[in-house]
């Protein structure tokens, strides 16, 4: 009896040791039996399923049109609740306009001062115009008449002095007038001549020089006054423009609906899905930042990202089925609308994962669809009838190549195969296998029974190629 117990104990210890080595990854000493699969042709369907977010193609975006002016933004004072049904012209939100109200008062003062300067400059110009006309038609004429009168008096005095000199010369010839008196009469004649010449010169200077100089001066004063008037008018226009802009900015602090719709807040999320900006009272919005969207329920789409290993199988126009999460039994017809040409920016969490954004248009939107809902999208990217297929677990990746372990009599042979697209269940086999071949479904457990080419050290560390099957070396 005790001998039987010893034999059973030894057998149990051997079995435990075999399982222990298997658990550590050591190869079993006992050969594994292949799990066979017969290669056959069949219809191959590749359907890509991803999750995305539903939004409206024809969203009307309500943005903050208030200029930041070297500030971080402007705060939301009041906003209607999300989901509110609004009509065109209804109130949506109010932004803080307190700073703009203060700016309006200061700008109104600037406008008033500019208007006063315009009035002053206009009066100076009009005064310059009057002064020019006053001199040309008044002062100049008056001065000329005065000088002409002086010249007339000088001529009369000269004529009288000349007559008196002649009379004195006759008296002097008869001895009635002495030489001294005669010389005085001659001096009076010369004096009258000089006074007449001076009057004529004065008149010539007035007409030829003084008049031209004064008219030039008055014309210059008029032009300067006109330029200053124009400048002040331009300044007033600028100040009025600034005031109008401030009033326009104050008006833009009150947002109203441009059309009928249902309010959806334009929250901002980063690449990792965290909320960078939440639309709420007190939140600060930047210039041109979208605050509210009014979705168009008749034009809905799903935005999703597709891994780079699958993007080659997705083309615009492909049929798709959209299943909104939360609406049981709702499968909506759709088609791929567009695919971005470049991968989306990735953060440090997905540094080695490249994804492309795609838009899937819903052909017949359901009334209960809402922007922001999550939806599952299945894209029928490939449908090939009667193609040779092999299960993904039967394809073994060895370095950069794929192999299938094919039954050859009582032996296994590692046959290199060229794989086409996969749907995570089957590979399309483009070459290497024939219909009716029996291949092993558990290649990892049969490595000791096949011969594979030796890999260089760098190949042994190589990542599994894109689209590799579940079984890998």
Image: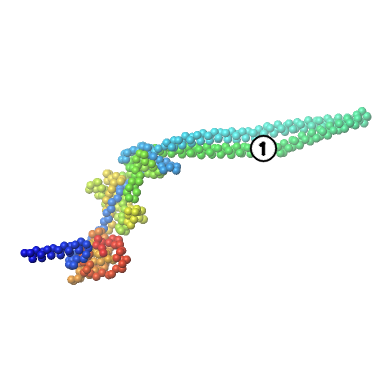
Answer with the quarter of the image where residue 77 lies.
Answer: top left
Residue furthest toward the front?
2
Q: Is residue 405 visible?
A: no
The answer to whether residue 289 of the structure is visible from this angle is yes
Q: Position of residue 54 (x, y in %)?
A: 30, 48
Left or right: 148 in relation to 236? right
Left/right placement of residue 60 relative to residue 408 reads right
Q: Residue at x 36, y 42 (%)?
A: 291
For disc 1, the marked residue is 215
The answer to whether residue 239 is left or right of residue 292 is right
Color theme of the render: rainbow
Residue 164 horizontal side relative to residue 444, left or right: right
* Residue 352 vs residue 154, the one in the foreground: 352
Q: Does residue 392 sit above or below 305 in this rendering?
A: below
- The residue lying furthest to the top in this view is 176
Q: Residue at x 57, y 33 (%)?
A: 120
Quarter that holds the C terminus: bottom left
Q: Secondary structure at mark 1?
A: helix
On-image quarter of the N terminus: bottom left
């Amino acid at each position: 009896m005790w001998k039987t117990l010893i034999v059973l104990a030894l057998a149990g210890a051997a079995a435990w040791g075999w399982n222990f080595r298997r658990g550590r990854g050591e190869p079993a000493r006992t050969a594994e039996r292949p799990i066979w699969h017969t290669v056959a042709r069949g219809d191959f369907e590749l359907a890509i399923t991803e999750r995305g977010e539903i939004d409206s193609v024809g969203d009307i975006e309500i943005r903050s049109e208030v200029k930041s002016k070297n500030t971080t933004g402007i705060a939301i004072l009041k906003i209607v609740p999300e989901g509110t049904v609004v009509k065109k012209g209804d109130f949506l939100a109010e932004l803080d306009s307190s700073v703009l109200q203060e700016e309006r008062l200061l700008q109104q003062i600037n406008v008033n001062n500019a208007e006063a300067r315009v009035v002053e400059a206009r009066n100076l110009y009009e005064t310059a115009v009057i002064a020019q006309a006053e001199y040309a038609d008044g002062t100049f004429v008056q001065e000329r008449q005065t000088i002409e009168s002086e010249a007339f008096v000088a001529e009369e005095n000269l004529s009288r002095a000349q007559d008196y000199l002649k009379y004195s010369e006759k008296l002097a010839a008869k001895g009635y007038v002495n030489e001294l008196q005669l010389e005085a009469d001659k001096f009076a004649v010369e004096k009258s001549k000089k006074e007449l010449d001076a009057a004529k010169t004065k008149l010539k200077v007035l007409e030829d020089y003084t008049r031209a100089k004064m008219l030039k001066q008055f014309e210059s004063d008029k032009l300067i006054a006109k330029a200053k008037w124009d400048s002040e008018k331009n300044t007033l226009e600028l100040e009025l423009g600034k005031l109008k802009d401030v009033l326009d900015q104050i008006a833009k602090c009150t947002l109203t609906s441009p059309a009928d719709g249902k309010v959806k807040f334009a929250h901002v999320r980063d690449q990792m899905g965290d909320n960078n900006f939440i639309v709420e009272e007190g939140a600060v919005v930047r210039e041109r930042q979208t605050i509210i969207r009014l979705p168009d329920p008749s034009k809905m789409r799903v935005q999703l990202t597709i891994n780079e290993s699958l993007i080659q199988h997705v083309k615009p126009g492909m049929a798709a089925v959209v299943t909104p999460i939360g609406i049981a039994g709702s499968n909506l017809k759709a088609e791929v609308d567009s695919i971005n040409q470049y991968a989306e920016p990735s953060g440090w969490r997905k540094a080695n994962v490249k994804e492309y954004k795609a838009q899937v248009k819903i052909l017949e939107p359901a009334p209960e669809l809402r922007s922001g809902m999550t939806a599952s999208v299945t894209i029928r990217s490939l449908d090939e009838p009667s193609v040779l297929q092999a299960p993904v677990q039967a394809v073994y990746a060895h370095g950069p190549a794929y192999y299938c372990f094919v039954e050859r009599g009582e032996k296994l042979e590692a046959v290199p195969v060229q794989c086409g697209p996969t749907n995570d269940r089957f590979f399309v086999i483009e070459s290497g296998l024939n219909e009716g071949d029996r291949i092993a479904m558990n290649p990892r457990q049969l490595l000791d029974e096949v011969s594979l080419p030796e890999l260089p050290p760098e190949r042994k560390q190589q990542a599994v190629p894109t689209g590799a099957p579940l079984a890998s070396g």
